[in-house]
Image (tube, helix red, strand yellow):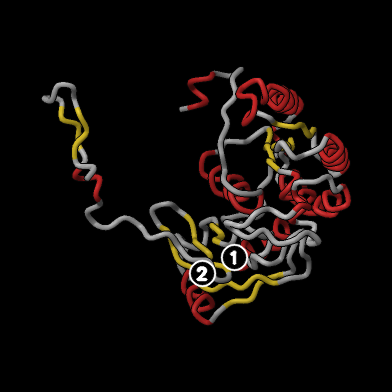
Amino acid sequence: IGLKLVGPSGYVLTEAGFGSDMGGEKFFNIKCFYSGLRPKCAVIVCTVRALKLHSCKAPKVVPGAALAKEYKEENLQLVAAGMANLQQHIANVRAHGVVPVVAINRFATDTDAEIALIRKMAIEHGAFDAVQAEHHAKGGAGAVELGEAVMKACSKANINNFKFMYDAKTDDIKTKIEKIVRGVYGGSGATYSEAAEGRIRQYEMDPSIRVLPVCMSKTQYSLSDDATKLGAPRGFQVHVKDIYVSAGAGFLVVSLGTISFIPGLPIKPAYYKIDLDLDANPPRVVGLS
């Protein structure tokens, strides 16, 4: 619908959720698989604070507690050390044949030197461009530079370069999982619970299931399935706890580590009671309480 609205010369933006290892990977290997769409550019949003955290040398960030001074004062060493994480996200986008642009979401405590270092290193690591984004402070005017960078990246892109991380139709289920682990997360492979092994054997015998793409369910705090592994960990194995079919959506859900699923709607969700009373003056929404 978006593409029809903007026409051949317009731009449609999709917020894929979390990092290239999460929403990005799913967008490329599930949405693009079914829709046939081929993105020209992917914007990777980063912050100085997040890179300092991923340096593995800065104090932990504790919810509800004040940020340590390292996050609010210039520290180029921490920023440089944390760039390994951003480098992996850039590589993940490029591995799918898509042009990456880095948006540096600037905070008031960030310094020009820190922003410049991120830009320099991001481009060295393969980003088409890296620009600061100040739309939170300046509104639309603060995002003009980012918009221009995205438009320029799209003009240089070739959608024929797009590629999937795995072949959903021919790769077996374990191969799909482990190609993501090695090619996106930076790990070495996967281990499987007895329950997961049993389900995989069952699913491989069903020709309508074994050809489905996989939807990896894991922590968003790490490239691995362990939230405590910051930066760009290597050589790890993810643990597949369970796997099940989401037939309506058309993919296999692979549960990694200790991740919990969000409960689905009940048989009769509360929105059934919500309505618009047009007889009231003025009209009002009913059923919210």
Q: At x 56% / y 36%, what residue is drawn?
A: 14
Q: Amino acid at mark 2?
A: Glu
Q: Is residue 210 left or right of residue 191?
A: left
Q: At x 73% / y 23%, what residue is drawn?
A: 145
Asked where in the image residue 47 lies, by quadrant, the reply is top right
Secondary structure at numbered mark 2? helix
Q: How many marks?
A: 2
Image location of residue 92, percent across then percent down:
73, 49
Image location of residue 139, percent across then percent down:
61, 24
> Does the residue at mark 1 contact the one at mark 2 (Cβ under 8 Å)?
yes
Up/down of 97 relative to 189, above or below: above
Q: At x 58% / y 55%, what residue is drawn?
A: 168
Q: Is residue 17 left or right of residue 92?
A: left
Q: Earlier in the sequence, mark 1 or mark 2?
A: 1
* Quarter of the C terminus within the rendering: top left
Q: Which labelled disc corresponds to residue 172? A: 1
Q: Amino acid at mark 1?
A: Asp
Secondary structure at numbered mark 1? loop
Residue nearer the viewer, 65 or 225? 65
Number of other residues with Cα within 10 Å of mark 2, as a class: few under 14, some 14 to 19, many 20 or more: some
The answer to whether residue 84 of the structure is visible from this angle is yes
Q: At x 65% / y 20%, what residue is drawn?
A: 141
Image location of residue 277, percent across then percent down:
15, 30
Residue nearer the viewer, 60 or 223? 60
Image location of residue 248, percent across then percent down:
38, 53
Q: Which labelled disc corresponds to residue 204? A: 2
Residue nearer the viewer, 31 or 13? 13
Distance (Cα) linking label 1 and label 2: 7 Å
Up/down of 272 relative to 201, above or below: above
